[in-house]
Image: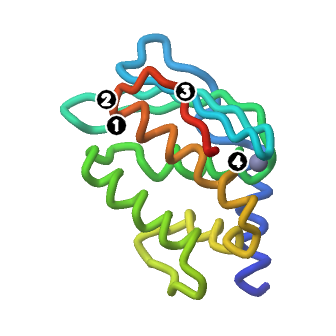
Amino acid sequence: MDLSELYRDVIVDHNRRPRNAGRLECPTHQAEGNNPLCGDRLRLFVQLQDDRIRDLRFENAGCAISTASASLMSEAVKGLSRAEVRGLFESVHRMLTAPGAAADPSLGKLAALAGVREYPVRVKCASLCWHTLNAALANSADPVTTE
Ligand code: ZN
């Protein structure tokens, strides 16, 4: 099995069985995101404690890439501080936008989304959840849009 096949399996798996789907009863932070280009909609619920993400859930209606990306992100950011989330977002953003960038080993399973950069429209699907998480952590009341 080559790497791209493995990555495709990760995306298919997270789209079929999204991790951390649902909502939190008493989130400390939340935000909504929209990607009008594709029609992806996302609502994120975050439980922040001592500046770390203790729990995170999401509700979404969107394409396979946006669903898999939110699921992968939800696993990757649990337990991270806000500064660590920012650092991870920068690595993900580089992976999604820099052609030929070497895979950052710290990305782990998130590297499954690297192939998305060949499809600029899909980059917005994959990055929607990250922009929405930034907005949630900043306690921004304005819905996020990728436009
Ligand atoms: Zn999409």
Q: Give the percent coordinates (x, y) of residue 68.
A: 69, 50
Asked if residue 26 is positioned above or below residue 20 in the image, the reply reads above
Q: Disc 3 designates what residue? A: 143
Residue 129 relative to residue 137: left or right = right
Mark 4: which secondary structure? helix
Q: Disc 2 designates what residue? A: 48
The image quarter in which residue 58 lies = top right
Mark 3 vs mark 2: in front: 3
* Alpha carbons under labels 1 and 2: distance apart: 5 Å
Residue furthest to the top: 25
Mark 2: which secondary structure? strand
Q: Which of pointers 3 and 4 lies earlier in the amino acid sequence? A: 4
Q: Nearer the viewer, residue 95 or 13?
A: 95
Mark 4–mark 2 CB contact (< 8 Å): no
Q: Which of pointers 1 and 3 lies earlier in the amino acid sequence? A: 1
Q: Which of pointers 1 and 2 lies earlier in the amino acid sequence? A: 2
Mark 1–mark 2 CB contact (< 8 Å): yes
Residue furthest to the left: 50
Q: Residue visible at 72% across and 66% down?
A: 120
The amino acid at mark 3 is Pro
Q: Disc 4 designates what residue? A: 66
Residue furthest to the front: 147
Q: Disc 1 designates what residue? A: 53
Image quarter of the N terminus: bottom right
